[in-house]
Amino acid sequence: MPTQPSRPERSGPETASVMDVPPFKPSLVKAVFRDVTLMHVSRSAAWAAASVTRTVLTEIIDGARRAAAGEARRKLVPGDLLSAIDRNVELEVGIKWYDHSPTFQGLTGDLYDAEGVVVPSRKRSGSRRSSAVVGAHRFEGEVKKLLRGQGVTAVPAFVRDLDGIASVFLTDLARDAAMVVREGGVRRFGTVTPVMPGEPAPPPFPKDSLQALSTRRGDGWTIGRDDILAATTIQLFGGNLRQRALAEAREATPNTSAG
């Protein structure tokens, strides 16, 4: 397994570098992939998926930490999670979890039928829940490591929400990676680049990098590192978070697409 390179802190003295905290365990990542696909998942693919998830959750925690700091708190609560997502559209990931969490109730909007009548919420049972929600308890220990890396603690509801977001995000990433393998590459890339008020626009993502991911090499039954990178471009908007997630995943994995 590759060692993790050290990187300078990026968000100030209170925030540890994202690379200082190991990614989620590859065994946990592969368990999520097994719920989605029968394809083989290479070690570098599992490590890349773990790295991308770590980057996304670290950014969410950082946004929540800043919201809590505005109220002179170091213990994060669900309201801080909502504030982080509200301030940065790039952090709106794992949205299938929102329907299962009290934190997000009332924020996803009502559904209407063709006649304009509100569709009642569907009652859920354990047998009808997606595997991502059923397995949302897998990452509690990993989430707590990320919180410690940011120098904060959180109430159990906050940890549970990050747990669920991580599970759903990884599940979606696994589905997209499997699709990339089946289709032989990415057929289309998102071009939306969200810009926060008062912040400069991020530099455009290099076209050659996107082109390299759009054409797949390798067999049709193994998910490799580059398949995860391609899936990341589908899951994340074309802003700073996507670029950072891709860059850190490349640093965290060997330069191979399948090994």
Image: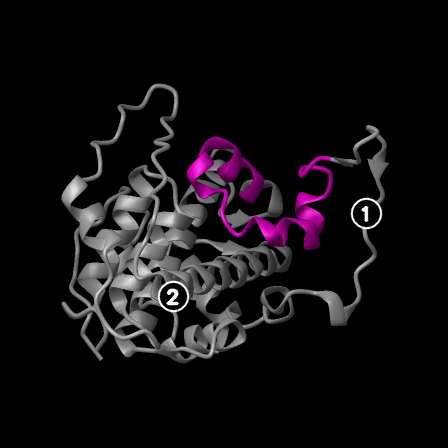
What residue lies at 31% left-to-right and 62% top-to-bottom?
Answer: 184
> Quadrant location of residue 114?
top right
Whether residue 148 can be seen here: no
Magenta span of residues: 81-109
Residue 27 rendering spot, x and y as whole percentages: 41, 80
- Towards the viewer: 71 or 37: 37
Q: Tell me if 241 is positioned left or right of 132 in this view.
A: left
Whether residue 243 can be seen here: yes
**Looking at the rendering, in which quadrant would you find the C terminus?**
bottom left
Residue 194 rendering spot, x and y as whole percentages: 38, 30
Residue furthest to the top: 198
Find numbered disc 1 in the image and state the secondary structure of the residue it sits on. loop
Of the residues shown, which amino acid type is indicated by label 1? Ser
Q: Which mark is residue 121?
A: 1
Mark 1 crowd level (few <14, some 14–19, many ≥20, 10 Å Cα): few
Residue 72 rendering spot, x and y as whole percentages: 50, 37
Q: Which residue is mark 2?
A: 182
What residue lies at 48% left-to-right and 43% top-to-bottom?
Answer: 64
Q: Tell me if 161 is positioned left or right of 30 in this view.
A: right
Mark positioned earlier in the residue sequence (1 or 2): 1
Find numbered disc 2 in the image and state the secondary structure of the residue it sits on. helix
Secondary structure mostly seen in magenta is helix
Of the residues shown, which amino acid type is indicated by label 2? Arg
Residue depth check, mark 1 versus mark 2: number of the one nearer the observer: 2
* Contact (Cβ within 8 Å) of mark 1 with mark 2: no
> Quadrant location of residue 13?
top left
The relative height of residue 178 versus residue 86 in the rendered view (above or below) is: below
What residue lies at 48% left-to-right and 71% top-to-bottom?
Answer: 141
State yes or no: residue 90 in magenta.
Answer: yes
